[in-house]
């Protein structure tokens, strides 16, 4: 449950932000026990736990689908993302960022706990959850290489219940906004990584989802393309209609886009606060320093640009 | 219902556009069909004899018998292979996860991905039969086309259940197509593709009677070569429908369970 709905895009922390996981759990208890009507957060994560089975090689790999899950990826994770808010997931490789995003995108099942998108449980009502989310995995895969950008967008837009006319309108809008006009009529296999990323973001936004989930959106982009991509995203967020939960190793990206940062380490939530509050509470001069202090060690998971 | 049909159409269009983006496969397939048909014709000329004609259930000689068996194999292959192949392609191109985050349903996704390959296979079969009729005397005039279409449709339904089951296996274990291996293996001996099952030993004939391919092939040969009425194939069609009624839900359930399992183990996109 959001503590405040007036804080869209603000950078100052609410004084009670640190209580949010506990409040979220209490709300969840009321909701399930007493069918208590509570305004929905854009994203709500309650006591989320995920264990994976151990990876096996050789002939035992054949049995891997039936192995008992024993490797922890997320441990008792609880927080929420407010309407119109942008929350960054910050953590080293293996901290659980992608796992969390994939659970929310209904691509992964949690071991226990709840994950909701716009009030819809990702496990019990995956279709309703999917109606409200756009997912971008940060790779330049995921398109039909022999189809044009427009054909790809139209196909995915129509699968998301858009009419042909609406899909075409939206594609035209994104074409202008994301400078895709040339790319739209070329086969995807001929496009650069940066263009495919913009195409992918357009696909994620095409059906006007309430929540955008991005997994390292600038991972495969060069510095200039990444900068341009962030500005596209920032302009999209300033419209205030979409909530964003994204994972990134790039601290400049996080500082540019995020209202709040969820710091994860080994599947646990270490902190959830605004960038300025995190720095203030850890007596740090930079976000990198705050991250290092929170996680207790200098992390190799940060991208080089984070150290600049 | 309309939205499901619309989704199926979208998948069909997707595959049609992808196929169109490659140049000249149609010409190559037509030429390839000519070589295939010619090969059966000359094999049939080599082995044909009055005794062999007597052993065959319909007119048209061994050439017509073998060509129908061969084109049916193509259909069977499509039903068993299509789901695996489209799943593998989606996994390798990274589109699988993006399809799964859309609002489309799993059955629509599976059925939609099979539509174009089935349509293409039907056309290919038509080309084989057309070459056979144009150049090698395949007796098309005896065919009951309504019965042919009905038999092909219920055969597709029956064998698609196994194809979907096999796709579930692929999703879970990442390699292999056990349904294809098993069914094509058994059918090559006890399915009556290239020789009548009546020449098999008794115990193998029993095997043939338990095999849906035997019924599908018998009905298809009767429809194409036997000058039969639609009601004459209804017995075989109802047996095939029975297979479909069991195999399709079983395949869907197994695929959904495999998908759930891979979503639990985090191996959905693994190769």
Image (cartoon, helix red, strand yellow):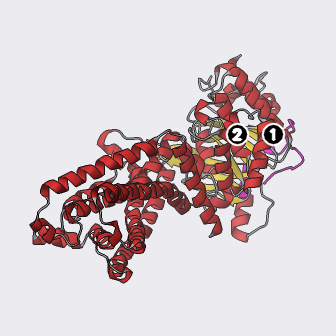
Q: Residue at x 31, y 73 (%)?
A: B219
**Is residue A37 depicted above or below A80 in this figure?**
below
Direction from residue A240 to residue A95 in the image, left or right: left
Determine which residue is flagged by label 1. A236
Decide: is A171 above or below A120: above
Q: Is residue B251 above or below residue A266?
A: below
Which span of residues is magenta-colored? A1-26
| Viewport quadrant of the C terminus of chain A | top right
Which chain contains the residue that carries disc 1? A
Q: Are marks 1 and 2 in contact (CB under 8 Å)?
A: yes
Query: What residue is shown at x 35% (from left), y 49% (from top)?
Result: B33
Q: Residue at x 72, y 51 (%)?
A: A43
| Residue B156: quadrant of the picture | bottom left
Q: Quadrant of residue A56?
A: top left
For label 2, the residue is A201
Is residue A172 shown to the viewer in this render?
A: yes
């Amino acid at each position: 449950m959001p503590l405040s709905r007036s804080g869209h895009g603000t950078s100052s922390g609410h004084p009670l932000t640190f209580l949010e996981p506990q409040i979220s759990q209490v709300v969840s208890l009321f909701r399930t026990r007493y069918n208590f009507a509570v305004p929905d957060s854009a994203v709500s994560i309650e006591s989320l736990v995920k264990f994976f089975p151990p990876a096996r090689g050789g002939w035992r790999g054949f049995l891997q689908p039936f192995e008992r899950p024993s490797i922890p990826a997320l441990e008792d994770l609880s927080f929420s993302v407010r309407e119109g808010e942008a929350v960054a997931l910050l953590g080293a490789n293996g901290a659980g960022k992608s796992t969390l995003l994939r659970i929310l995108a209904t691509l992964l099942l949690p071991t226990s706990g709840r994950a909701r998108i716009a009030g819809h449980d990702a496990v019990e009502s995956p279709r309703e959850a999917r109606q409200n989310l756009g997912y971008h995995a940060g790779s330049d895969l995921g398109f039909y290489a022999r189809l044009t950008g427009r054909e790809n967008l139209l196909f995915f837009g129509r699968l998301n219940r858009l009419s042909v006319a609406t899909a075409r309108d939206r594609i035209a809008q994104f074409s202008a906004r994301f400078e895709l006009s040339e790319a739209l009529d070329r086969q995807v296999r001929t496009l650069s990584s940066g263009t495919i990323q913009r195409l992918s973001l357009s696909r994620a936004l095409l059906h006007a989802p309430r929540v955008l989930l991005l997994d390292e959106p600038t991972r495969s982009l060069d510095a200039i393309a990444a900068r341009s991509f962030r500005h596209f995203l920032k302009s999209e967020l300033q419209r205030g209609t979409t909530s964003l939960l994204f994972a990134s190793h790039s601290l400049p990206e996080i500082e540019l886009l995020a209202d709040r940062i969820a710091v994860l380490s080994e599947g646990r939530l270490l902190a959830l606060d605004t960038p300025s509050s995190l720095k203030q509470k850890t007596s740090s001069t930079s976000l990198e320093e705050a991250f290092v202090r929170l996680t207790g060690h200098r992390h190799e998971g940060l991208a080089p640009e984070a150290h600049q | 219902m309309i939205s499901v049909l619309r989704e199926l159409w979208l998948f069909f269009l997707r595959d049609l556009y992808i196929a169109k983006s490659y140049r000249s496969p149609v010409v190559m397939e037509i030429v390839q069909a000519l070589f295939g048909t010619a090969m059966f014709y000359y094999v049939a000329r080599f082995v044909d004899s009055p005794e062999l004609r007597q052993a065959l259930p319909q007119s048209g000689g061994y050439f017509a018998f073998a060509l129908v068996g061969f084109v049916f194999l193509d259909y069977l292959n499509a039903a068993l292979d299509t789901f695996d192949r489209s799943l593998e392609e989606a996994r390798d191109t990274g589109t699988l996860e993006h399809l799964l985050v859309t609002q489309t349903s799993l059955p629509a996704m599976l059925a939609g991905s099979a539509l174009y390959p089935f349509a293409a296979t039907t056309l290919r079969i038509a080309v084989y039969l057309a070459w056979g009729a144009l150049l090698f005397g395949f007796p098309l005039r005896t065919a009951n086309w309504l019965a042919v279409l009905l038999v092909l449709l219920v055969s597709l339904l029956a064998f698609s259940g196994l194809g979907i089951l096999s796709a579930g296996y692929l999703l879970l274990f990442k390699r292999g197509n056990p349904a294809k291996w098993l069914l094509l293996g058994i059918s090559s001996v006890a399915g009556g593709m290239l020789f009548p099952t009546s020449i098999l030993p008794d115990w193998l004939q029993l095997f043939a009677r338990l095999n849906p391919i035997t019924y599908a092939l018998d009905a298809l040969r009767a429809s194409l070569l036997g000058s039969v009425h639609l009601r004459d194939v209804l017995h075989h069609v109802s047996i095939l429908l029975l297979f479909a009624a069991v195999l399709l839900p079983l395949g869907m359930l197994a695929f959904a369970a495999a998908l759930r399992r891979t979503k639990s183990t985090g191996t959905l996109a693994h190769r």
